[in-house]
């Protein structure tokens, strides 16, 4: 059974609706979930907010947070995940923002991806993963896998 299939079974068993808020993955997490037949039982919606303006208008990320921490930060990931909950009927949301490459900087290198997991009634959890510079496709694929794992583990 694939991770999205396990996620579907776990969320269905608990009656949980899921939303995603994605930047660097561009909808790959949503696509992985909705590739599974029956995913409409648990997938409420996905937000692809690639630009800062989209993060602000679609998810309510504050301009002050973006200015203070930059789009690739746990602070922005937190506001993205919480915004996905606030702008949907979901009770569980994952957010992803990062630098898939090529490029990056000394302070925010290629392969740095920030995640947040928000669940109604629980504190939002954030984390940063350093995937290195294996290439854009690999960073995006690893980020997608990690987001699915975060969702699965929260339904444990």
Image (tube, grey):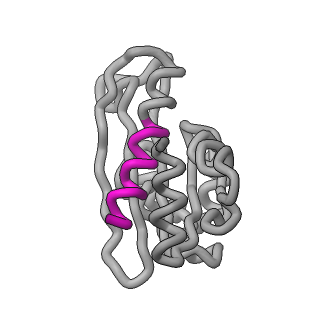
Q: Which residue is at 56% across, 38% downward?
A: 25
Q: How many marks?
A: 0
Residue 2 placement (x, y as % from top left): 48, 42
Residue 104 placement (x, y as % from top left): 42, 23
Quadrant of residue 145 within the rendered picture: top left
Magenta segment: does it hold 134? no
Q: Check the image and report above or below for 13 versus 34.
A: below
Q: Check the image and report above or below for 108 versus 80.
A: above
Q: Main secondary structure of the magenta part?
A: helix
Answer whether residue 87 is visible to the viewer in this image. yes
> Magenta part of the protein: which range?
143-156
Q: Which residue is at 52% across, 74% downward?
A: 16
Q: Which residue is at 38% across, 84% downward?
A: 121
In the rendered image, which quarter contains the C terminus?
bottom left
Magenta segment: does it hold 146? yes
Q: Which residue is at 43% across, 55% downward?
A: 77
Residue 106 placement (x, y as % from top left): 30, 23
């Amino acid at each position: 059974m694939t991770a999205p299939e396990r996620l579907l079974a776990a969320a269905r068993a608990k009656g949980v609706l899921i939303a995603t808020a994605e930047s660097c993955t561009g909808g790959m997490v949503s696509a992985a979930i909705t590739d599974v037949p029956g995913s409409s039982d648990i997938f409420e919606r996905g937000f692809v907010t690639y630009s800062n303006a989209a993060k602000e208008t679609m998810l309510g990320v504050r301009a002050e947070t973006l200015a203070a921490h930059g789009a690739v930060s746990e602070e922005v990931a937190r506001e993205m995940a919480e915004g996905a909950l606030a702008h949907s009927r979901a009770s569980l949301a994952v957010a992803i923002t990062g630098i898939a490459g090529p490029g990056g900087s000394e302070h925010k290198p290629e392969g740095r991806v920030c995640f947040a997991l928000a669940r109604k009634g629980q504190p939002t959890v954030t984390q940063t993963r350093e995937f290195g510079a294996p290439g854009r496709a690999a960073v995006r694929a690893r980020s997608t896998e990690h987001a699915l794992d975060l969702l699965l583990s929260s339904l444990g």
